[in-house]
Each structure stands twice: as structure tokens, then as C-alpha cells.
Image: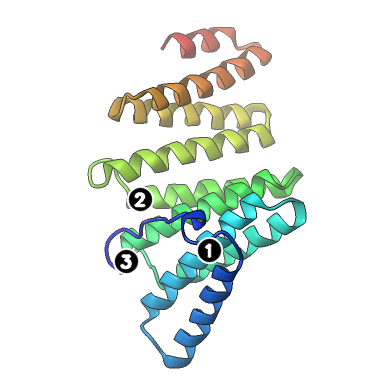
Amino acid sequence: MTGIALRVRASSVCKSSPFIEICQGTLALLYQTEKPAQDWAETQNSLGITLEDLGIRSAAEEGRKLLTEAVAAYRSALEVYTREQLPQDWAMTQTNLGLALWQQGLQSGGTQAAELLGQAVAAYRSALEVFTREQFPQQWAITQTTLSDALGSLSNQLGGKEGLKNKREAVELLRDVMSHQSDDLSRYRLASALGSLAFNLVLNCQFAEARAQCLG
């Protein structure tokens, strides 16, 4: 794969599980015929996207199972898509992995949820090492926003001082995006994150910071 691997939603490719079987069959064929490793990694990435989308749409246990398989597929792709050799493909797969882990976290509870959400945050941070504002401004803005969302979910799980710390960072990430693209959606996301942060600051009796955040 050359350049940035564009994420294609499974709903635009296939609406049911046969596409998964096609990917799995392709992987077996590529393994048997010793095709280039990048072809294998690309198919793993496509499989991960499909499993992830089906996992998001599926209920309870089946959804969690599919998301777990999606994570495994992305991690397999990352064995080939290394930062050193294929940095853009590596970064895009990291964002895909981050989304799958985030969804896993949302469908889990307790310490497992916090661990999965923490892994999602780490994957998005990794992607931002390549998707910089200067070189890839659009991908940077998207990844900053999804990282902010993941931090918001993680903060809800952690609570307390650590939760507030994550909410503050989530707001700052969105402020950065706003400075780059001041559109209605960016303003809405920032306002929503600010509202959540201010509410939690008030609950912790940090009134001065809550006022400063909202007015800043």
C-alpha cells in the first residue's frame, strides 16, 4: 500500500459477514503463495475495519467478540506497517486500532474498560507522532478530535483527579483543533467538552477554574 491508507467503512463495501470470509480466504491464499507482506497487511487492515464496524453494530457479547478480533487484525497489520518503513500506513492503522479499542472500552466496565480506553489513547498518541499539524493537517485534526473523545471516555471511567486531568487535556486538544479549523462542528465539540469539564470542576468545588475554562 502506498501513501495514506484511506479508511473505508464496511457499510460501503459489504453489509454482512461474507466480506469477512473473503478477507480470511485472501489471507490464507497470500500466506500460501508468499505474496508481498504489504498485501497481507492491507488485507488484515481491511478485515479489521469490517470486524470493527460489525462489532459496533452488534449487540453485547457478539459485538465484544468482533471488536476483539478487529484489534487482533490491526495488531497483525502493524507487524508489517512499521513506523520506520511505512509511517503513514502505520499511523492510519494506529488510528483504526484506537477506534476499535475505544469501542471495546465503551462496551466494557470497571478496570477492563479503563485499561482498554487507556490503550486507545496510546494508539491515538502514536498516530499523532506521524500525523503532525504541519505535514498532515487534516489527519492531525481528525486524530486530535478522536483522542479528545477517548480521553473524555477514559476520564469518566477514572473519575477523581486523574479524570479531571484527562478532561482538561481533552479540552486543550479541541482548542488546538479550533485554532486550525473554526467550523461549527469544531465549536460544538469544544463547547460539549467544556461543559463536561466545567460540570466536573463544580462538583469538585473548583469554581474559579470552571469559570476561567468557560470564559477562556
The x, y position of residue 204, in whole percent, is 66, 16
The kind of secondary structure element at disc 3 is: loop
Q: Residue at x 58, y 47 (%)?
A: 102
Is 153 left, or right, of 39 in this rendering?
right
Label 1 amino acid?
Answer: Gly
Is 95 left, or right, of 72 in this rendering?
left
Q: Residue at x 42, y 29 (%)?
A: 174
Alpha carbon distance from label 1 to label 3? 18 Å
Q: Residues within 10 Å of mark 3 (few under 14, many from 20)?
A: some
Closer to the eye: label 3 or 2: 3
Closer to the eye: label 1 or 2: 1
The x, y position of residue 145, in whole percent, is 44, 36
Q: Residue at x 64, y 50 (%)?
A: 57
The kind of secondary structure element at disc 1 is: helix
Residue located beneath label 1 in the image: 48
Is 109 left, or right, of 141 in this rendering?
right
Nearer-the-camera pick, 113 or 49: 49
Label 3 amino acid?
Answer: Leu
Mark closer to the chain start, 3 or 2: 3
Residue 57 badge: none
